[in-house]
């Protein structure tokens, strides 16, 4: 037999021995033990007293670490991990780091950490209780041995009775939890049975989070939709009516009908044109009157002048005024009047050109930009 085969055989024999002790504590044949049983089991295997670190903390940490499915008990496979750790601790060996499988709980890292913390606290509490029970068991063994010198078989029987009581208590708890789950399932099935399959036809009696029934919500939505459609229809009808009225009252317009346009200051183009025309007529009439008066004055001077021709009229004096100076003054005034009139005409033409440039040629097709 090779050394490897010998090691394998020893490991198998050791595992079989551990399983026999494990089975002694598995009274309900569920292939699992709880925290109380774990402490006693390690003690029976001779490992509990050899643990070099704090015993209660060690048992709590190992239970929380190896109870991988979180069901509150250890299967034999899970217990083997605790057993090996206890052997390493007792021998002063540092355990190899565990390679953990990814969690199947679906919890995020924060929730998983919190779950582990709660589990560790619960395990520590149970480990402390198990420590107390272990001490009580040891005292009981010592008392029995001191009083009657009872043999180990009687002591084993007493321990078995104690263990059986613990197993019965655990079994009762499991049965109570099973009944609770069964009753919860029954209530859920009854609720599902009494709940009608919902389709679009029977959603009307459902109630939303704010207390509004689906029927009321649908009615309100329908009413809001009808109101919006009516408002849009009325707006469209009014727009059509306004457009029709504008077309009816509007004459087909091009650049020639700018007279009804309104400038930025509120004055109509027609009014501006009339004002400019009136100003021009007044200036022309004033100029014409000035020319007529000049001709009349000249005729008077000619009539009153003796032996004078046009060449020497300038030196005549009429009413104390030199004719030459008077003519020059009249000429200057006439020139200034003509220049002012010319400037007014130019400004008027400039204003009209600007208005035409800023006003797009309009016909009946662009009535939409007219004010109503």
Image (cartoon, rainbow, N blue to C red):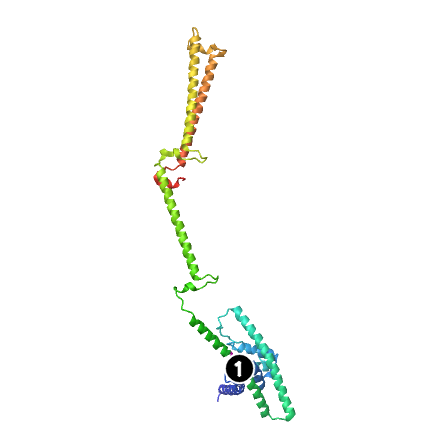
The total of numbered circles placed on residues is: 1
Q: Quadrant of residue 205?
A: bottom left
Q: Is residue 350 visible?
A: no
Q: Which residues are magenta?
A: 171-176
Queried whether the magenta region covers residue 110, the answer comes back as no
Q: How many residues crowd mark 1 within 10 Å: few (<14), some (14–19), many (20+)? A: few
Q: Is residue 159 left or right of residue 341?
A: right
Q: Residue at x 42, y 21 (%)?
A: 285
In depth, the one of 251 and 192 nearer the eye is: 192
Q: Secondary structure at mark 1?
A: helix
Determine if residue 90 is in view.
yes
Residue 166 screen position, x and y as percent: 56, 84
In the rendered image, the vertical position of residue 143 relative to residue 99, given as above or below:
below
Residue displayed at 39% across by 33% down:
259
- Check disc 1 and report the residue beneath it: 172
- Tell me where residue 273 appears, x and y as whole percent: 41, 30
Q: Main secondary structure of the magenta part?
A: helix
Depth order, front residue of 33/46: 33
């Amino acid at each position: 037999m090779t050394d490897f085969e010998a090691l394998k055989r020893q490991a198998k024999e050791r595992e079989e021995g551990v399983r026999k002790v494990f089975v002694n504590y598995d009274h309900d044949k569920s292939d699992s033990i709880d925290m109380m049983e774990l402490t006693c089991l390690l003690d029976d295997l001779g490992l509990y007293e050899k643990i070099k670190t704090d015993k209660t903390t060690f048992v709590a940490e190992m239970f929380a670490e190896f109870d991988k499915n979180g069901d509150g008990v250890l299967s034999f496979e899970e217990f083997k991990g605790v057993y090996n750790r206890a052997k390493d601790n007792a021998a002063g060996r540092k355990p190899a780091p565990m390679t953990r499988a990814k969690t199947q709980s679906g919890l995020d890292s924060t929730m998983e950490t919190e779950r582990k913390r709660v589990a560790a606290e619960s395990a520590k509490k149970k480990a402390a209780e198990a420590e107390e029970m272990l001490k009580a068991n040891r005292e009981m063994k010592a008392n029995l041995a001191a009083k009657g010198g009872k043999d180990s078989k009687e002591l084993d029987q007493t321990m078995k009775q104690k263990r059986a009581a613990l197993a019965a208590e655990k079994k009762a708890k499991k049965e109570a939890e099973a009944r609770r789950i069964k009753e919860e399932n029954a209530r859920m099935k009854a609720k599902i049975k009494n709940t009608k399959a919902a389709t679009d036809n029977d959603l009307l009696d459902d109630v939303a989070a704010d207390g509004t029934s689906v029927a009321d919500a649908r009615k309100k939505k329908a009413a809001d939709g009808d109101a919006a459609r009516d408002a849009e229809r009325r707006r469209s009808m009014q727009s059509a009516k306004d457009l029709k009225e504008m077309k009816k009252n509007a004459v087909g317009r091009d650049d020639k009908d700018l007279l009804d346009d309104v400038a930025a200051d509120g004055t109509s183009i027609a009014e501006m044109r009339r004002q400019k025309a009136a100003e021009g007529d007044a200036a022309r009439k004033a100029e014409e009157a000035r020319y007529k008066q000049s001709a009349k004055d000249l005729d008077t001077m000619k009539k009153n002048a003796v032996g004078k021709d046009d060449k020497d009229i300038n030196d005549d004096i009429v009413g104390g005024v030199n004719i030459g100076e008077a003519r020059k003054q009249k000429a200057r005034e006439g020139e200034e009047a003509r220049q002012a009139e010319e400037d007014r005409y130019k400004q008027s033409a400039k204003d009209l050109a600007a208005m035409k440039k800023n006003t797009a040629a309009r016909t009946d097709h662009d009535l939409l930009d007219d004010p109503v």
